């Protein structure tokens, strides 16, 4: 199952389990109905910001929301910004941006923007990086202390 399909299926399951209507979820999260419809029609991918909003609303991990794990809760004792966590991981790896770009197919400009805090990855790139560094999306996003 692709990432978007897994996300949509999990989101719909969470809504059904909690008996939440889409209109109410939209109002509460401030994510517009057209955005939800685009996800459900698989014409748009959720942004990192929206994944975090939904993760917080449903009190579950981003990994769970994206169908990557069956464990729903992961919380950081000291949440950190994505660019801080990504910089830490990059430094720890000792890898150059060029090497990482070649191995993950994430653009060099994207990687530099992630470290500077001027860009956030798309879901596909976030998953590529998490897979490469063998960590959870939540860890990479700074939402969990557990790798």
Image: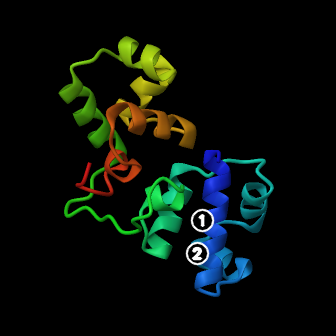
Q: Where in the figure is residue 93, as x and y percent of width and height?
A: 23, 25
**What SS does tag 2 mark?**
helix
Quick one: 129 or 90, which is closer to the camera? 129
Query: In this rendering, does residue 111 appear at all?
Result: yes
Q: Which mark is residue 10?
A: 1
Residue 111 in the figure: left or right of residue 28: left
Residue 77 lies, in percent from the top left, at 20, 64
Instruction: Give the image location of residue 41, x and y in percent.
Output: 81, 55
* Residue neighbourhood size for the residue with mark 1, other residues' Cα within 10 Å, grouped as few (<14), some (14–19), many (≥20): some
Q: Is residue 19 above or below residue 138?
A: below
Image side of residue 25 versus residue 59, left or right: right
Look at the image and tell me whether residue 120 can be seen: no
Nearest the eye: 117 or 76? 76
Which residue is located at x 60 percent, y 65 percent?
10
Q: Are marks 2 and 1 in contact (CB under 8 Å)?
A: yes
In the picture, the disc for residue 44 is none
Identify whether 144 is placed above or below 16: above
Q: In the image, what residue occupies the spot 76% across and 51% down?
A: 42
Q: Nearer the viewer, residue 92 or 31?
A: 92
In the rendered structure, find residue 14 and report the number of the disc placed on it. 2
**Which residue does the image show at 43% across and 74% down from the upper left?**
59
Residue sitting at 33 percent across and 38 percent down? Answer: 134
Q: Calculate the distance from the C-alpha at mark 2 to the C-alpha at mark 1.
A: 6 Å
Residue 78 position by quadrant: bottom left
65 on left or right of 13: left
**Is disc 2 surrounded by few (<14), some (14 to 19) or many (20+) residues within 10 Å?**
some
Looking at this view, name the residue that lies furthest to the bottom: 19
């Amino acid at each position: 199952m692709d990432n978007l399909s897994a996300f949509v299926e999990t989101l719909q399951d969470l809504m059904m389990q909690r008996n939440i209507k889409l209109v109410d979820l939209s109002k509460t999260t401030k994510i517009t109905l057209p955005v939800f419809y685009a996800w459900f029609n698989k014409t748009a991918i959720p942004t990192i910001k929206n994944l975090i909003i939904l993760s917080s609303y449903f009190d579950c991990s981003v990994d769970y929301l994206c169908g990557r794990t069956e464990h729903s809760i992961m919380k950081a004792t000291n949440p950190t910004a994505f660019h801080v966590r990504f910089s830490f991981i990059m430094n720890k790896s000792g890898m150059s941006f060029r090497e990482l770009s070649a191995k993950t197919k994430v653009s060099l400009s994207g990687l530099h923007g992630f470290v500077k805090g001027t860009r956030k990855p798309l879901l596909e790139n976030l998953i590529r990086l998490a897979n490469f560094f063998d960590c959870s999306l939540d860890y990479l996003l700074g939402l969990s202390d557990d790798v």
